[in-house]
Amino acid sequence: MQAKEIMTKDVVTVSGSATISDAVATMKAKGLRALIVEPRYHGDPYGIVTETDVVYKVAAHGLDPKKMHVYEIMTKPCLVVNPELGAEYVARLFANTHIRRAPVIQKGLLGIISISDILRKSDFVENPKSDFDRYCKENPGAREARIYD
Amino acid sequence: MTQEVVTISGSATVAEAVKRLKDKGLRALIVEPRHSSDPYGIVSETDIVYKVAAYGHDPKAMHVYEIMTKPCIVINPDLGVEYVARLFAQSRIRRAPVIQGGLLGIISTSDILRKSDFIEKPKPLFLEDRIDVARAEARTICKEKGETSPDCAAAWDIVEELQMAASDQRSKEKEVAEKSSFEVYCDNNPNAKECRIHDD
């Protein structure tokens, strides 16, 4: 399964200059755990601000969310996922970089993919794909792959 | 916190854990202690994706005990939300069971973000410590620049401001803590005869 098949298409963006309290209000209203910070000009990277950023960097210090801004706590540039990337590779990428969600980008923002999407929508329980399975699928002519047939 | 908690046995398969998470719409399951001195454990969405899905392991052939966090950090129900946030940030976790005499619930970064009043009433931490520091600084400044200097006055203004914030916090906490049992009764039974007298 590919990232685009399991991603959440409902994405909301926020400006880096918005206050944290505005960002939280948007998250609450839309029931989201992260907002995407759009590039400011062509060539500027994407950014992300998550629930965790707000709790770890604002609430944990008793700072006033009305006086702090998204740019102070966001992750920018953030890791982005290609829509064709396999769900198992997204999982591996997330595990290696210790992240839980990333925007899916190809010429523009297509959606957002999270560990919940992988858990709930991918077929990793029904069809676990080991590295060897994947190798055989990608190289059906390989000698090791053929022996097993 | 969220009072709806679902538990799972450490010997269950990861596939069963995934099913339970999906069915209940949860992000973590609590692993109950096996005997009275055994600790609580937790298994989260993240554990499953990072340790099973990421490697293409078969969730039907793996067990919760292989990927769970046990012992896990547990939260006392009386801990202030701002301290829960700080504990989470410092230990880099996002949810923990709330325990006192037994499993009461689970608290997560989402609960803090969505249900606490940190936006309306940000609560600066360690006010008493900051007052001590500000007071020492004010004394030093006044000694150096003179008791009547503007710098000295400004330094004591800072102390005053911090003290006001602290007494404000304390009175709010007292209000909650010192509600009489009668008030609590009326909160729970607003239509009781004894309570209605207060409405007139």
Image (tube, grey):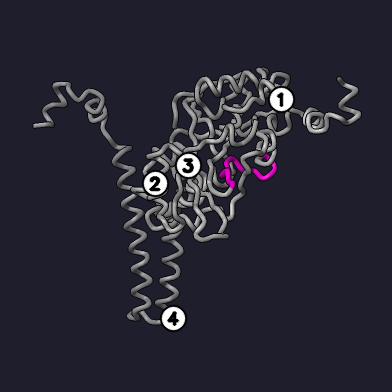
Which residue sits at x=49%, y=52%? Answer: A37
Marks 4/2: CA distance? 39 Å
Mark 2 surroundings: few (<14), some (14-19) or many (≥20) residues within 10 A: many
Seen in the picture, residue B58 relative to B113 is either above or below; the reply is above
Badge 2 and badge 3 both on one subunit: no
Compared across the picture, whether B186 is left or right of B6 comes to left
Label 2 – label 3 distance at C-alpha: 25 Å
Q: CA distance from mark 1 to mark 4?
A: 72 Å
Residue name at image x 61 percent, y 21 percent: B17
Nearer to us of marks 3 and 1 is: 3
Compared with B56, A83 (above or below) is below
For the C terminus of chain B, which image quadrant?
top left
Residue A138 visible in the picture:
yes
Residue at label 4?
B144
Mark pair 2, 1: CA separation? 42 Å
Can you tell which of label 2 and label 3 is closer to the viewer?
3
In the rendered image, residue B118, in percent from the top left (x then y), is placed at 39, 46
- The disc placed on residue A54 is none
Which residue occupies 27% across, 35% down?
Answer: B179
Query: Of residues B9 and A119, which is closer to you in this image?
Result: A119
Instruction: Reply above or below: A47 against A2.
Output: below
At a point 41% along the width and 55% down the height, the residue shown is A18
* Residue range highlighted in magenta: A95-106
Q: Which kind of residue does numbered mark 3 sit on?
A: Val
Chain of residue at mark 3: A
Q: Which residue is mark 3?
A: A11
Q: Answer yes or no: do the residues labelled 3 and 4 have beta carbons within 8 Å?
A: no
